Image (cartoon, grey):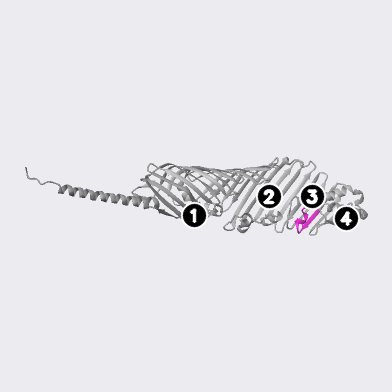
Amino acid sequence: MFRLLGWLIGITLGTLTVTAFLLFTQTGNGLLQPLAENALQYKLPQAKITLLDIRLDHANLAIQLSQDTQATLNAKTDLLSEQLTGTWQLVAKDLTQLQSITPMPLAGAASSTGSFELSLNEQKAIGKLSLTLSQIDFTLSHHQDNTLTVDTQGKLLLSEITQLLQQPNLASGNLHLSAQLKLDDLDDKNTLNGTIISHINDGTLKAQAVQEKTGIALPSNTPFTLNTNTDVLNGKTLSQVLLNSPLAILDLTNLHYNLGEDGVVGEHQTLIHDLSKLSFLTKTPLYGRIQVNGSFTYTLPTQHLILDASSQILGGKITAKLNGEQFSANLHELQTTELATMLAMPVVFKSSLTGDLAYDLRTEQGKFDANLYDGQILPNTFSILLNNAAKFDMTREVYRQVHADGKFSAGVITTNMDMQSQLTHVSTQNAIVDLKQQQINATLITQVKGLNIPTAIQGTLTQPNVSVDLGVLLKKQAETAINEEINKEKQTLVDKIKKQLTLPSFGH
């Protein structure tokens, strides 16, 4: 809009200068009008000048820029002091009709009114830009030393901003804006200095609109607040952004951007008080609290994001990197008991986990490899059944190193595991964990006392059914019992025979 106003004022001044010898008579105005109209139609074919009245002491101009856009400019001239003062008014019902002269495609209705003072030493404009329910007040000042200052403040509805920029209306709320900028040299963007402050205190993220645009199913409309502060020094910006919502608190600090360059770099800190509120993103319910810190680089033309993050969590540490669609993470000394609690799974194994994983966000494919140290099985259905049947307590066994690996595929984890203690060996191949359906299907083979005992684990992740096949063990026990009984009968028979064969004693 500022560009449009400047363009209108510029045409007026240029026309005054070039054709000054004709301007001040009705005849001159009549000759000038079609020339000026042709110049307008170079950019706006529908444009028509409905009034052109330029005299020694005033200049009045009315233009039909498009079918739904009118602009008027009324000015008074003082040739002795070389000054021009006046007012303007612009009313546009449909900005799409002005795309040939706007810096970017715009839509919706807008209007602007204001006043200006033009002289050889300074050009100044004071006005306002209005949408239906939004308004920005501004002051522009251009000095003869080529310095431009801009002071603006006002309130904008997010719904009207998105309509203006032809973007999806994902949120509602009021954006309060205040900016003071100074450009010391119009030809050098690196001479820009100033501050820009904005805040939204009543924002609401619209669940249905977000799902239609991104496919992310927010459980409900989500309130938020947003505060930003940007300092500009010699064409370099330094920004802070704080987004607060019931889902998460996102704090972006030290955001650096150099005008004219492609990349934004900064630091981030995300705090999530309740992971269960993000199940619409994680696809599997998570529980607990997490804080993630790191840095990022964002390339504007390609929208490519490189992000580093780390978190002290689950008794250990996770470091991760996102490079476009590629995600990788290193897990260091995570405690399996805390991990099971986060996943709301039964706590059946205590160990320290270290490993790596890689995942492609686009294809939803990935793999992982991990080692668990000093593991110990905790009392559970399987250990109790085994203890009752085999008189063997697996919870006393220590697994110095357990290896696990597998792959991810669209929310389904296929894993292999192998663990061995002094007296046992437990393994599983191609165990299935479906995070989307919250299901598990796995078979453990436990080798103990020379026997292979299968254990089926099936059902929901939170309460799986555990079925131990004790057939081999019971058969072994039966065979042992039978052998013991046979040996007992054998011994009884031997003792009887021995007794019968014993000769009587005559006392010699």
Q: Is 129 displayed left or right of 405 in the figure?
A: right
Which comes before the other along the chain, label 4 or label 1? 4
On residue 6, the disc is 3
Q: Are marks 4 and 3 in contact (CB under 8 Å)?
A: no
Q: Is residue 170 magenta?
A: no
For the point 70% across and 55% down, the residue is: 166
Q: Which x, y percent locates residue 447?
A: 39, 46
Q: Amino acid at mark 4?
A: Asp
Q: Is 155 displayed left or right of 91 in the figure?
A: left
Q: Is residue 99 magenta?
A: yes
Which comes before the other along the chain, label 2 or label 3? 3
On residue 53, the disc is 4
In the image, which residues are magenta? 87-100
Residue corresponding to mark 2: 178
Residue 290, placed above or below residue 108: above
Total count of labels: 4
Residue corresponding to mark 1: 439
Q: Amino acid at mark 3?
A: Gly
